[in-house]
C-alpha cells in the first residue's frame, strides 16, 4: 500500500482499478504486447491510452491529449471513429 501523501498517490489509492489498468498498459507497451497507435481522431503521434472499461485493461483507445481531455470533459464518446453505433 502506498503511504505517500502526494496527489498521485492519493489518486492511486482512491482508484485501484484505474491504476491497475494503467500499469497493465505500461507493462504491455514495454513487453511489445501492445503497440502505441496514432490518435484515432486527428492522427497525432503523441497519444494517451484511454480505457472505456477498466476491466479490459488492454482494450484501449489511442487519443492525443487534446482529444482525451475533450472526451473526459464532455463525458460522452464524441469520437466513434472505427466503432459501430448502436441504433
Image (spheres, helix red, strand yellow):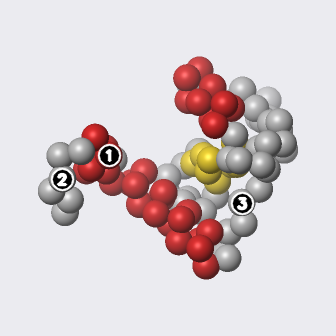
* Residue 23 placement (x, y as % from top left): 46, 63
- Is residue 32 placed above or below 76 in the rendered structure? below
Q: Which mark is residue 36?
A: 3
Alpha-carbon span between mark 2 and mark 3: 30 Å
- The residue pinned by badge 2 equals 4
Task: Note whether residue 71 is visible.
Answer: no
Determine whether the residue tagged by mark 2 lies in a helix, strand or loop.
loop
* Residue 82 placement (x, y as % from top left): 84, 44
Measuring 49% from the left and 52% from the top, which residue is drawn there?
A: 54
Determine whether the residue tagged by mark 1 lies in a helix, strand or loop.
helix
- Is residue 7 placed above or below 4 in the rendered structure? above
- The residue pinned by badge 1 equals 8
- Position of the C terminus by quadrant: top right
- Is residue 70 placed above or below 43 in the rendered structure? above
* Mark 2 vs 3: CB contact within 8 A: no
* Residue 33 placement (x, y as % from top left): 66, 75
Measuring 18% from the left and 53% from the top, which residue is drawn there?
A: 4
Classify mark 3: residues with Cα within 10 Å, few (<14), some (14-19) or many (20+).
some
Q: Earlier in the sequence, mark 2 or mark 3?
A: 2
The image quadrant that residue 25 belongs to is: bottom right
Q: Nearer the viewer, mark 2 or mark 3?
A: 2
Q: Which mark is residue 17?
A: none
- Position of the N terminus by quadrant: bottom left
Alpha-carbon span between mark 2 and mark 1: 9 Å
* Mark 2 vs 1: CB contact within 8 A: yes
Classify mark 1: residues with Cα within 10 Å, few (<14), some (14-19) or many (20+).
few
Measuring 68% from the left and 32% from the top, which residue is drawn there?
A: 67
Measuring 31% from the left and 50% from the top, which residue is drawn there?
A: 12
Amino acid at each position: 500500500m502506498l503511504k505517500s501523501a502526494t496527489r498521485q498517490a492519493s489518486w492511486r489509492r482512491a482508484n485501484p482499478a484505474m491504476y491497475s489498468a494503467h500499469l497493465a498498459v505500461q507493462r504491455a507497451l514495454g513487453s511489445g504486447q501492445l503497440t502505441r497507435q496514432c490518435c484515432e481522431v486527428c492522427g497525432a503521434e503523441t497519444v494517451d491510452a484511454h480505457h472505456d472499461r477498466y476491466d479490459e485493461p488492454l482494450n484501449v483507445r489511442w487519443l492525443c491529449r487534446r482529444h482525451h481531455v475533450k472526451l473526459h470533459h464532455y463525458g460522452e464518446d464524441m469520437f466513434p471513429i472505427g466503432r459501430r453505433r448502436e441504433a
